[in-house]
Image (cartoon, rainbow, N blue to C red):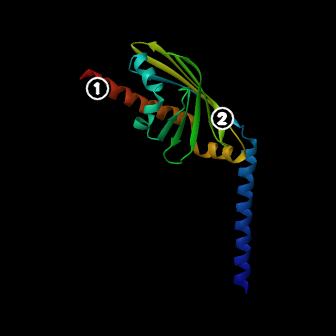
Amino acid sequence: MARTKIGVGRMNWVLLVVAVVAGLVVAAALLLPATTRTTVEIRFDAPIAAVWAVYADFESQPNWRSDVGKVEVASDRRSWTETLEMSGMRVHFQILEESPPSKLVLKTGADGNFEGRYVAEFKTENGGTLGTFMEEATALGFVPKVMRRLFFNQRKFIEEYAREAKAEIARRESTTDH
C-alpha cells in the first residue's frame, strides 16, 4: 500500500508541475504583443534591376523558393496567393505600392492567422544593391500569436528569402551570359 501512495503522490506532483508550466506559457503568451516588426538590411552583389526582377517575379517563386509550393496570381496581377510547401498554409499578398526598381509595399495575410505589411526597398550601393526589408505582422488571436512566437522567426525568414533570391539572381545572370 505504501508504494501506491508514493506513486499517486509523485503523479500529483507531475500534474502540478505540468499545470504550472502550462499556466506560465498561457500567461506569457497573453503578455506578448500581437504585432511584431523586423527590419533587415541585405547586400546583393548584383545590379538593382536584377534584384528587382527576381523580387517582383511572384509567379516564378515556386521554382526557386524552397518554402513555396504554388502561386496563384489574380487577374488584376496586383494580388496573389502562395501555398506553403510544408504546412499548406495559404498566404495572401496585395501590392499597395510599387516603384520599380526601388520600392515594393505589400499587404500580407493568412486566413485567421495573421495580417501585415512587407516593405522591400532597394538602392544602388558600391556596384551592388542594398536591400532594406521590413516585415510587420499582427497575429489574429491567441493560438496564432503563440504559434508565431514559438515557430516563426521573421529575421530568419527575410534572410532565407534573400539567400534564395541571391541564388536565383546568379542563376538568371549565368543563363544570360551564355
- As rendered, which of 8 and 62 lies closer to the eye? 62
Q: Is residue 39 left or right of residue 34?
A: left
Quarter of the picture containing the N terminus is: bottom right
Kind of residue indicated by mark 2: Glu
Give the residue drawn at x 46%, y 32%. Answer: 59
Mark 2 or mark 1: which comes first in sequence? 2
Which circle marks residue 175 in the picture?
A: 1
Question: Furthest-left residue in view?
Answer: 178
Residue 87, x across and y down, in percent? 54, 48
Give the residue drawn at x 51%, y 15%. Answer: 102
Alpha carbon distance from label 2 to label 1: 37 Å
Question: For residue 10, which quarter of the picture?
Answer: bottom right
Residue 100, x across and y down, in percent? 50, 15
Can you say whether 104 is above or below 83 in the image?
above
Q: Is residue 59 left or right of residue 16?
A: left
Kind of residue indicated by mark 1: Thr
Which circle marks residue 115 in the picture?
A: 2
Pointer 2 local density, CA inside 10 Å: few below 14, some 14–19, many at least 20: some
Quarter of the picture containing the C terminus is: top left
Can you say whether 143 is above or below 61 in the image?
below
- As rendered, which of 163 and 16 lies closer to the eye? 163
- As rendered, which of 37 and 106 lies closer to the eye? 106
Residue 62, x across and y down, in percent? 44, 38
Q: In terms of secondary structure, where does tag 2 sit?
A: strand
Residue 163 in view of the camera: no
Residue 131, x across and y down, in percent? 49, 21
Residue 94 in view of the camera: yes
Can you say whether 165 is above or below 22 in the image?
above
Q: In terms of secondary structure, where does tag 1 sit?
A: helix
